[in-house]
Image: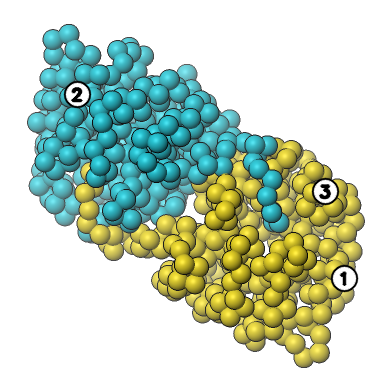
Chain colours: A yellow, B cyan
């Protein structure tokens, strides 16, 4: 067993804001190469309205093309009951489908209303139904508390609000609960505090996961703080994908290679191979036609491989 | 008193690898604006051979133009005795000059020989003389252990080697000792371990400082680990300057704005104003003719200021 499970979210969160549609084959190439690099949980698509998120219009096609591995758990993101129904449909007949319904509860009334048309309380009610539906149909029922660290409209989110969301989801039978710093505004002290409160609220019986964006440069620091607080499931995207070329203020997820570099160098096992992740980065950069944000893929994983240069201090 | 002292190193470490010479006036503009933003310790120049580092050829001119503030401490970097003599000369007559001789000891034989023509032992002997000279001439005598986390030629540096360097410098009378991750290969667990060893070796009487580069995306995480380990003096450069446009593998110092964002949001006082630092970033980007790496300056310091966009999780 690895010390930390890295959930690769590049094919979903990493791509959803990309204006140029990435082909289904390239999405499957990304997923397959990351499985070959050692990833065992992958967020593969989002069951959203294709008019709102055109990049996810091929969700069912991506899922139909997934490697039929029994040692890999595929996650489909579900923003509402319709999403969970699509996750269930993906498994009907003899289809491989997804293994997990990744539900989403927004911890901010304003953000929730603008994004999903729901207040927090409406979101709690909807997610209760979603988790029940998922569980009754053999899917892993897990949920992410979105905007748990800050909201683009309301500012910092009170920790009490996050704890209330988490308690409601635990009561609703979520098998895993994630805190997501959707807009990348969290800092390590906040991560330590918030996961401490959440763990105290739900006890040891529920698995916690952390989801960070590197919007303000603190994503990797937050990941380390979460690990130090006992969270051993972390989301990341290959290359730090997730920014949007036309919206320079929206930065990507923490990079899988940077997370892996940090954990490797700290003696924390993940089951992933950093060289294979870097090779995947270099391949996917050719797909995207640009260098990806991850710095480890540029600098190389080990100090001895660093080129001589005009260093000083 | 601030909880953490940020030492602004942009005018030295941030610029030294820039191929285009930045004017003395613009360097002074950067230094002055950062003082106006609240910085009280500034690394202003390096006393090196201008043939080796052309960007530092105007060291004496920069120092001659510094604001005559008594509440600010100016640091000149010294790689050898000749450097310390130049630091001393900068104060002769009625000149303001620098306040601190920032000496450098490389914790790797190969790197030391290639960069300064000295083994570790030769470096220890030279730095003993440098610290004595500085002290006898009224300068603050401090030293940075360079390549303390990894060497571009030898790989990871044994912590015992770093502790040996630190002990020698403490014995030689250094008033402050810094550990520098020159090539940006450190991770938080290593930072915690190494500063713990160093503190145990030198006791509480000597001030410790940390100097990180963000080459592999872990710089801000390392800064937080150093702070958590009791280090309350941190180097950073405005905008994360310090990369080299022609050497994409050499990334910059940790960014002053990102460090400040993290400390501000954690309730750790620094005396600096983040909005003023971001304004300086935007001005200096026009000087350099390019966007600087810092992400906070792009995303804005607070979640409420974040623009609405197509978020999801």
Q: Residue at x 48, y 30 (%)?
A: B279
Whether residue B191 sits left or right of residue B146 in the image: it is right
Q: Marks 3 and 2, Cα distance to the nearest angstrom?
A: 58 Å
Whether residue B66 sits left or right of residue B185 in the image: it is left
Q: Residues within 10 Å of mark 2 (few under 14, many from 20)?
A: some
Q: Of the residues tagged 3 and 1, which is closer to the observer?
A: 3
Determine which residue is flagged by label 1. Answer: A133
| Observer-nearest of B228 and A55 | A55
> From what the image shows, is residue B123 above or below residue A28?
above
Determine which residue is flagged by label 3. Answer: A113
- Specify the quadrant of the image occupied by residue A94: bottom right
Q: Earlier in the sequence, mark 3 or mark 1?
A: 3
> From what the image shows, is residue B70 above or below residue A132?
above
- Specify the quadrant of the image occupied by residue B93: top left
Q: x and y percent of residue A132 in the render?
A: 88, 67
Judging from the image, mark 2 belongs to the subunit labelled B
Q: x and y percent of residue A191 in the render?
A: 62, 45
Secondary structure of the residue carrying tag 3 is helix
Q: x and y percent of residue A295 in the render?
A: 42, 57
Q: Is residue B238 visible?
A: no
Secondary structure of the residue carrying tag 2 is helix
Judging from the image, mark 1 belongs to the subunit labelled A
């Amino acid at each position: 067993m690895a010390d930390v499970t890295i959930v690769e979210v590049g094919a979903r969160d990493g791509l959803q804001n990309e204006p140029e549609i990435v082909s289904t084959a390239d999405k499957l190439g990304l997923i397959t190469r990351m499985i070959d690099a050692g990833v065992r949980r992958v967020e593969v698509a989002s069951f959203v309205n294709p008019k709102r998120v055109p990049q996810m219009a091929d969700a069912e096609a991506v899922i139909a093309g997934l490697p039929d591995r029994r040692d890999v758990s595929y996650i489909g993101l579900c923003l509402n009951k319709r999403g969970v129904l699509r996750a269930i449909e993906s498994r009907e007949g003899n289809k491989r489908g997804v293994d997990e319904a990744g539900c989403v509860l927004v911890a901010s009334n304003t953000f929730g209303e603008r994004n999903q048309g729901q207040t927090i309380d409406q979101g709690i009610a909807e997610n209760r139904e979603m988790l029940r539906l998922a569980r009754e149909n053999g899917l892993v029922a897990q949920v992410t508390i979105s905007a748990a660290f800050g909201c683009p409209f309301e500012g910092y989110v009170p920790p009490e609000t996050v704890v209330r969301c988490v308690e409601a989801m635990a009561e609703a039978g979520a098998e895993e609960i994630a805190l997501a710093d959707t807009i990348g505004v969290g800092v390590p002290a906040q991560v330590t505090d918030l996961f401490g409160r959440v763990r105290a609220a739900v006890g040891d019986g529920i698995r916690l996961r952390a989801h960070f964006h590197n919007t303000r440069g603190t994503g990797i620091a937050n990941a380390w703080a979460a690990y130090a607080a006992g969270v051993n499931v972390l989301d990341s995207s290959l290359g730090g994908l997730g920014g949007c070329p036309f919206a320079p203020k929206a930065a990507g997820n923490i990079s899988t290679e940077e997370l892996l570099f940090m954990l490797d160098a700290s003696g924390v096992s993940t089951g992933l191979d950093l060289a294979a992740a870097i090779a995947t980065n270099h391949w996917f950069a050719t797909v995207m036609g640009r260098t990806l944000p991850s710095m480890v893929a540029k600098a190389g994983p080990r100090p001895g491989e660093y080129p001589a240069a005009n260093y000083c201090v």
